[in-house]
Image (cartoon, rainbow, N blue to C red):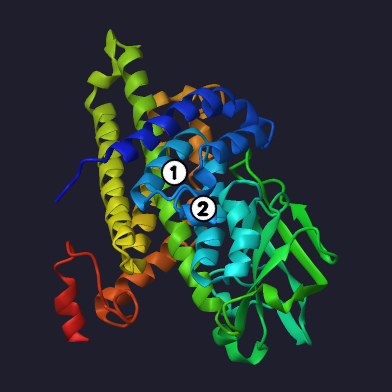
Amino acid sequence: MEFDLTEEQRLIQDTVRSFVDERVLPNAIENDLEHRLDMEVIEGMAELGLLGIVIPEEHGGAGLDFVAEALACEEIERGEAAFRTLISVHVGLNSLSLLRYATEEQKQRYLAPQARGEKLACFGLTEPGAGSDVASMRSTARREGETYVLNGQKNWISYATVADHQLVFAKTDPEAKHKGISAFIVEREWPGVSTRETEHKLGVWAGSTGELFFENVGVPAENLVGEEGQGFEIAMYGLDQGRFTVAAGACGVIRACLERSVEYARERETFGQAIGRYQFVQDMIAEMVLGYETSKLLVMQAAWLKNEGRRNTRETSLAKWHATESAFRAAHLAIQVHGAYGYSSEYGIERYFRNARAPIIYEGTTQIHKLMQAEHALGYRNLNGRGGEVSPLAAWAPTLAQAR
């Protein structure tokens, strides 16, 4: 079992770490408080190849592996959640879905410029009445000759107002539930497409979250991704990719809280000694260490499976659930270690707390992931789909699979 990183993986880790220290953290608190999306940071991410990090070179990407992507996401979210969110939706949800399901013509027209960072992309799945229950979506796409007429609304879409390309899901057969969903590539500038920024969020103030509106939008039939009725499969595949980056980014939150808390606990003194000498403070530090290392191991297990080309829905779900909950817990503890300073925007700790709340909801709530894990274990859900393969470390899996 190899735990060491390759030279290439260490290089991307060091490069992104330096980028965050030099370009993200110095302005992170100010950008957050002013609700400002720093497009220069996004341009810098594109220059580093992060917007196509796991996309093959022949499609404009950097061609790196999923361990490298995880390391990059951790470093980015150590600085600011908004920019890791971009990797999640642009790379994980959108570009990797196109890589698997798009035609060669679609890849050349849409995927390649996304991978090079020339165009930004988002993922239009969630609706006001359809979140965890994807099949209840009301957006429709009616075929008329060589065009689909798209109508509907999407909300809580990261980068909705700035993304050039949208991967939008709508029902082509409203009576078929999830089997009637199809996927389309939509351009923001097309007639009938409009967007609106979502205001008054709890966190991720330095990012973009918005709504998509479609009013009789004419989508060329050639922009259908996959086949009619394949949209649910495409969406679930994309979520596997996006959830992975969410889990990896959560490790960055835990690490940031741990590093800042350790530094503060060494310097801050009460009753004649550093607060790090008190066992209650040590208990909080120890919890952060446990949260970080267990989350990182689960993320790297999923990364290994992805690199091996194995189905990893269960493992990615487990990593996302555990890491996001651990990140929120670490941020809570970090505020406690810092006391009143942790509650103040001056130190930036409360920013991690606010930003860490959303990932527990999006790309599958904690409750959805608990349900998935329990149904896998009970045999009510095929282990990782039809194949039934799981991580080799999961020694319980063969027994449960047989019991089914």
Secondary structure found at label 2: helix
The residue furthest top is 272
Q: Quadrant of residue 126?
A: bottom right
Residue 384 as seen in the image, left or right of residue 133: left
Residue located 77% across and 57% down the image: 195
Percent x, y of residue 234 = 52, 73
Residue drawn at the location 54% of the way across and 29% of the way down? 24
Sequence-wise, the earlier of marks 1 and 2 is 1
Residue 5 location, quadrant? top left
Is any atom of residue 3 visible in this view? yes
Residues at circles 1 and 2 in contact by the CB criterion of under 8 Å: yes
Q: Left of 286 or right of it: where is 113?
A: right
Q: Nearer the viewer, residue 49 or 191?
A: 49
Estimate the x, y position of residue 250 in percent, counting from the top left: 41, 45
Q: Residues within 10 Å of mark 2 (few under 14, many from 20)?
A: many
- Residue that carries the numbered disc 2 in the rendered image: 88
The residue to which callout 1 is attached is: 73
Q: Position of residue 124 (x, y in %)?
A: 64, 64
In the rendered image of this protein, does residue 188 appear above or below residue 64?
A: below
Mark 2 residue type: Ser
* Image vertical order of residue 191 relative to residue 255, above or below: below
| Of residues 108 and 314, the one drawn nearer to the viewer in this rendering | 108
Considering depth in this image, is 222 or 33 the residue closer to the camera? Answer: 222
- Image quadrant where one finds the C terminus: bottom left
Q: SS for tag 1?
A: helix
Considering every residue shown, the one lying at the far front of the view is: 58
Residue 116: x, y in percent? Answer: 58, 47
Give the residue at the far bottom of this rendering: 175
Residue 38 is at least partly visible in this image: no
